[in-house]
Amino acid sequence: MKKLILGALALAFTLTFTGCNDDEDVTITEAGTLTGGPFSFLVDGIADNVSGISVGGNTVGTNTSFIITDEAGMILGLPGDIAALEGVNFDGAGAGKCFIWFIAYENGLEGLEMGKNANNLSGNYDLSNNIEVDRIQGASLSLNFTGLENLGNDYKYEGWIIVNGAPVTTGVFTVDDSGTLSQTEFYVKKSDLDAATAFVLSIEPAVDPDPAPAATKLLSGDFSGSSANVTSTGVVADFSGSTGKYILATPTDTDDTNEYSGIWFLDNSGMSPVAGLNLPTLPAGWKYEGWVVINGTPISTGTFTDVSNADDNAATSPFKGTSNNGPSYPGEDYVMGSVGSITFPIDLRGNTVVISVEPSPDNSSAPFTLKPLAQGIPAMAMDHSVLNIGAGPVQVISGTVTR
């Protein structure tokens, strides 16, 4: 009696077939080679299907089929062709590993039935290599955030859990103009979620070639049991002690009739000017930005990271005068040019000054959600006199993550 033993590389068993007597003519069967995969799916109640599998090489046999087995060789499915194989919902099988094979065989094969073990096949057949399908148990992670804003088409939010000190993505979502999240429940690998010590929310490019979190991290918090209270305080900054001072002046030109058209974040009440803003140093991925809100329109004074140095547009602002770039502190002169229907110079008194915290890079021309400082500019303010900025409307963003 003739016996052929086929090695099953990914399985802890061997498959055999028994052919005809040695003195009889035997039809040679060839199953070819499977390409595609391997596959890894989360068991999360959402259908998971394989794709891209093909049978290559020479296949010989009166009959052919795909076989799906578990790790012990039990036959779980017998899809007859590629279309049937791609229609199999692997999520429905629960957690575990299974293997896809291709078989070519002659009539009379015994044991090729659902529920039987492929180790016990008997007849004239040939098996291909196998493709592994790993069905990983998923678990639900729920997000409850308020205060997030629409990032536009170029950016998205992405959640991360920290597992053994390393970030593991939980998925991406967007936020509409009303602050509603596009998705609040995510399935992740249960073993990772059980081991997670913290949650982090970052802002990522919509087309993101980097699998790691961006520097622009907005929320973070440690898990305590099944939940984590996350805030911007620990990952962006604590703005509870922030204060600000500024003056109205136009030092970038020589015209002394438009002094109410410039704003500079400095304190000139002493012998020499000093920084007017008391703000914490921001981590990478964030910058401060000053604003004046004129008739409801926010107009930037420039971005900066150091309250004791000029802002990023000190030398390039289209609104400043032509005499110089002004003092070495954040600020802006609005003495020429225009924004929309607003023409400069313009009296800034009676409007609002704001300091916001902006993602860097930033694709929005409006202030970001975090606004640690804001104040109305007094209608009767004097130029070159120190004015105060109080606490802004949003100094912290917070939320809850539940596993």
Image (cartoon, rainbow, N blue to C red):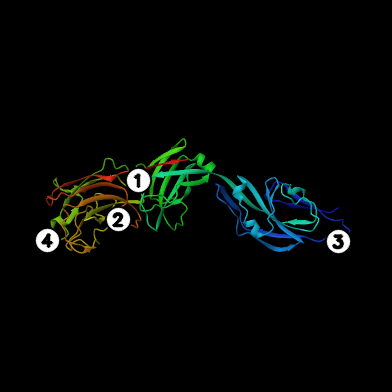
Q: Which residue is mark 4?
A: 255
Rate crowding at label 4 as few (under 14), some (14 to 19) or many (20 or more) other CA atoms within 10 Å: few
The CA distance from mark 2 to mark 3 is 82 Å
Q: Earlier in the sequence, mark 1 or mark 4?
A: 1
Query: Where does the image place residue 316, in percent across and percent down from the top left?
Result: 25, 62
Residue that label 2 marks: 366
SS at circle 1: loop
Left or right of 95 in this view: 157? left
Q: To which residue does mark 1 refer?
A: 236
Q: Amino acid at mark 4?
A: Asp
Earlier residue among tags 4 and 2: 4
The disc labelled 1 sits on which kind of residue? Val
Tell me whether the residue at label 1 lies in contact with that at label 4, contact meaning CB atoms closer than 8 angstroms. Answer: no
Decide which of tag 4 and tag 3 comes sooner along the chain.
3
Residue corresponding to mark 3: 25
Alpha carbons under labels 1 and 4: distance apart: 40 Å
At numbered mark 3, what does the secondary structure look like: helix, strand or loop? loop
Q: Dot 4 lies on which element?
A: loop
In this orientation, which residue lies closer to the viewer: 343 or 277? 343
**C-alpha gap between disc 1 and disc 2:** 19 Å
Q: Is residue 356 left or right of residue 246?
A: right
Amino acid marked by disc 3: Asp
Q: Residues within 10 Å of mark 2 (few under 14, many from 20)?
A: some
Callout in the foreground (4, 3): 3
